[in-house]
Image (cartoon, rainbow, N blue to C red):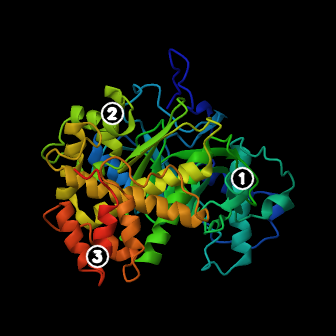
Amino acid sequence: MDQPEFEASPPEGMMILGEKIKNPYSVENMKKALDNLKTSDEFKSLSQEDVTISTSHLYLRILPKNEEEVNWFIEDTTMEMFDYPLDYEIIKEGFFYQDPDIPLGNPTWLYTTVPVDFKLPDMNIEVLDECYIPDYDNVTLKSASKITWLKELENEAFRITGNADDEKKSSQELMASEVPSGRFRVHNTSNDALEGLRRVKVRVHRVVKWDTDFTDDDGYYQMSKSFRRNPHYAIIFENSNGFKIWGNWAFLAPANYNMGYHDNTGHSKDFWKDSQGWPWAIVNNSVCDHRDKCDDLSIERPPTDLRVWFNETNNQSWSGAAPMLRRTYGYYGFNTHSMVANFFLNTTGIVITANLLSNLLQFCEPDIFINFDQDYSGNTTNELKALVYHEASHASHYSLVGNNYWVKYINYIITYGAYGDGTGSNAMYCGWGEMWGNYFGNYLTAIEYCGTSVHWSDGKDWYNPGFLRRVDNISDVTTWEVFQSLTGSPVSMAQLKINLYNKTSYDNQVDNAYDAYSDWP
């Protein structure tokens, strides 16, 4: 497979590849390496172990043709999909790769290595190479001599294919295969602390051999496979809790932060605000924090397979929306591109191009949309977390009320332009939703930052989220009970008050909370 060139300059953020390299793990090259070892004077003193070269893995490339096929690969946790070929030099790191033979915006080839007995789906899949990857980490191998043979076999395969140009030169050093481990942290600008990058996937590979692990809550990871040569490191913003974060550039997989080749003992990194990975890391930790706080308060979590789209802007502003597109798009009243574009315009003020919208709906379908200017000096961790908490709180409410409610909520926004004046059809679907998103998002932010409110307005618009705050302060009402009151029918303020009366012995205090605002529709 030759590497074609773009007619124009590659788009910003795209990985640049160089020459194709010889695959040391191909069955052909491994057999050559084994023949060399068996005739080498250095190994004549070793017992002739029964090392047989046969296909253990297949190196594949796949071209998904539709949303269903894309999602099959994204959701199969036994596969690790790369958007760039693994047997090419990387000239310049990037956050995505697009095959130059495929127009930008169209699905590009995906690459992976799978065990030879992996059951492949009936899709456009090509076998690029049959591979033998020595399994010297396998605990069933009892013979130290055989392990030595397998390690030397890998070394020899790297040597004869021209891939043995690591910093480590001596045979003794190269015999010390290492299990990569390390730690990733992100800078919290609001308290000037470095915090662990929580539960996110770390990926390493050297040519077609790869491994992954998820960080713990302190940002530590440790792979299960050892590597003889320095591997390539990346953070994939896919969380062990089940949610994924998409970035600006790619549509077929979660955001990738590629970090290049580093020592086989491991790699660690701190993400500061000037790093492209900083906002992804803050969003990741914020969704984790939101889920944990929901558990603490018995609030419904957002759906497990949540998808968050992060869009970086340069207009010194931030905005967000929670259309829950993976679940709601296609339902009556929310089934055309123009309706989705109108929804985003009304909620975020962002005009989404037809090409971007088509790709979002075909391949990503984000549940939550975060629009943020990372370079704006006024933006802090506090602000970005507050925005994520707000939108994730909407997603929690979705878990409680479901699709029928949410589509009416969305249609109100499309019809009346953001939040209207509260008098249109389905207005209170929006009112309940915005009350909860504003109140609970701010509530969590205030807990974390010792009472500091971020962009909170007690009497915002006509739905007055401060009403829920006042009710939550009634002595025998819990936050969970406030949340549970935001379901059922009819969806009206009168019904919400009835629901709250059922949670307290102090009906008059519910009335007082309601009467504190004079602009109810």
Q: Quick one: label 3 or label 2, which is nearer the N terminus?
A: 2
- Measuring from the top left, give residue 370's x and y in whole percent: 45, 44
Q: CA distance from mark 1 to mark 3?
A: 52 Å
At x 53%, y 25%, the residue is 11
At x 34%, y 66%, the residue is 513
Q: Quick one: label 1 or label 2, which is nearer the N terminus?
A: 1
Q: Amino acid at mark 2?
A: Leu
264 relative to 102, above or below: below
Q: Residues within 10 Å of mark 1 (few under 14, many from 20)?
A: some
Name the residue that disc number 1 marks: 270
Name the residue that disc number 2 marks: 345
Q: Is residue 393 visible?
A: no
Q: CA distance from mark 3 to mark 2?
A: 40 Å
Name the residue that disc number 3 marks: 508
Q: Amino acid at mark 3?
A: Asn
488 relative to 89, above or below: below
Q: Nearer the viewer, residue 249 or 74?
A: 249
